[in-house]
Amino acid sequence: MKLRVSAVQYHLHRIHSFEEFAKQAEHYVKTAEEFGTEFLLFPEFFTTQLLSIGNEQGEALPIQDLPGFTKAYRELFTKLATAAKMHIIAGTHVTEKGGKLYNTAHMFYPDGRIAEQPKLHITPTEVHEWNMSAGDGVQVFETEKGTIAMLTCYDIEFPEIVRMVKAKGADVIFCPSCTDDRHGFHRVRYTSHARAIENQVYVVTTGTVGSLPTVDFMRGNFGQAAVITPNDVPFPPQGILVQGEINDDMIVTADLDLELLYEVRERGSVTTWQDRRTDLYPDWA
């Protein structure tokens, strides 16, 4: 089984209407469609661009206003996914439930279904500055091309949660990210490689680029898309199928061969998934 994936290095800049946001999103989807993409990943927090629309006084909207765009966001990406016949992991969008804010990853299926996965590990900035709440459960999602998981940015830095989705059957982890400096970027990038090696899975990740000068905590962005593999003979030696140019507005595309994962799990140079010592430490299989 093979699937073609693309990841967007989404360029953040000030906009004046939801229509501008929609046109930018459509541009990336149409570009991916020209490449024959089956799964398209947008970054974490890319919908914070909507806050730059501002109010009547010209001030950026607060994070608490972002859930007000949820209906329009869901309608837009449902339309784009069904028209392109593509699975779109539309980054994350801030949603509200029970009076709490959640940083929620969404996957829009080609048939109009929508899957959601709230971020499980919340950074101090999300907690203290934006009053975000953590999700309370992890899922995997079945598609006609295999089983995937959506783990957002900080989530990938916790090996236990990735072990759990692998045990549930996920072969591809989509990791939308948003980091404002090199330190945060490399934390996500290095741990994405570690999770791919430990669990013998693919990790597709990307981040925001550009800046939102009027939106607090989105003024700086350091991002790069990458498709990451286990480090074994069938794959590139550095475990990178493709990566973008850092901080450029662009899309990267690669083909994932799931049969290669199954092969290295059984007969690889190392077989990290089957060799885990469940007699010494807990497991979720």
Image (cartoon, rainbow, N blue to C red):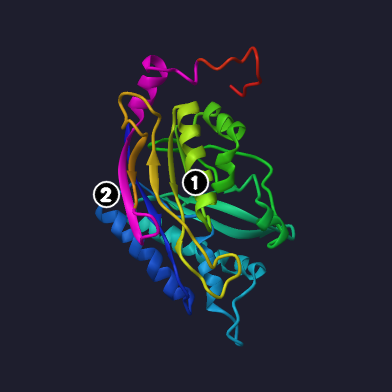
Amino acid, disc 2? Gly
Mark 2 lies on a secondary structure that is loop
- Residue drawn at x 38%, y 26% as measured from the top left: 261
Q: Is residue 268 magenta?
A: yes
Q: Position of residue 109 (x, y in %)?
A: 44, 49
- Residue drawn at x 38%, y 55% as measured from the top left: 246
Query: Which residue is at the far top?
Result: 279
Q: Position of residue 61 (x, y in %)?
A: 61, 75
Please identify, in this view, whether the residue under mark 1 or under mark 2 is nearer the observer: 1
For the N terminus, the image quarter is top left
Separation (CA) of disc 1 from disc 2: 30 Å
Q: Residue at label 1?
A: 186
Q: Is residue 259 magenta?
A: yes
Query: Which residue is at the far right?
Result: 99
Q: Earlier in the sequence, mark 1 or mark 2?
A: 2
Q: Name the quadrant containing residue 238.
A: top left
Mark 1 lies on a secondary structure that is helix
Query: Which residue is at the far bottom?
Result: 57
- From which residue to which does the magenta span run? 245-274
45 and 89: which is toward the camera:
45
Q: Position of residue 245 (x, y in %)?
A: 34, 54
Amino acid, disc 1? His
Q: Is residue 135 above or below residue 260?
A: below
Q: Position of residue 182 (x, y in %)?
A: 50, 53
190 and 36: which is toward the camera:
190
228 and 17: which is toward the camera:
228
**Numbered badge on residue 45:** none
Q: Residue at label 2?
A: 36
For the C terminus, the image quarter is top right
Q: Name the quadrant containing residue 28.
A: bottom left
- Residue drawn at x 31%, y 23% as measured from the top left: 233
Q: Residues within 10 Å of mark 1 (few under 14, many from 20)?
A: some
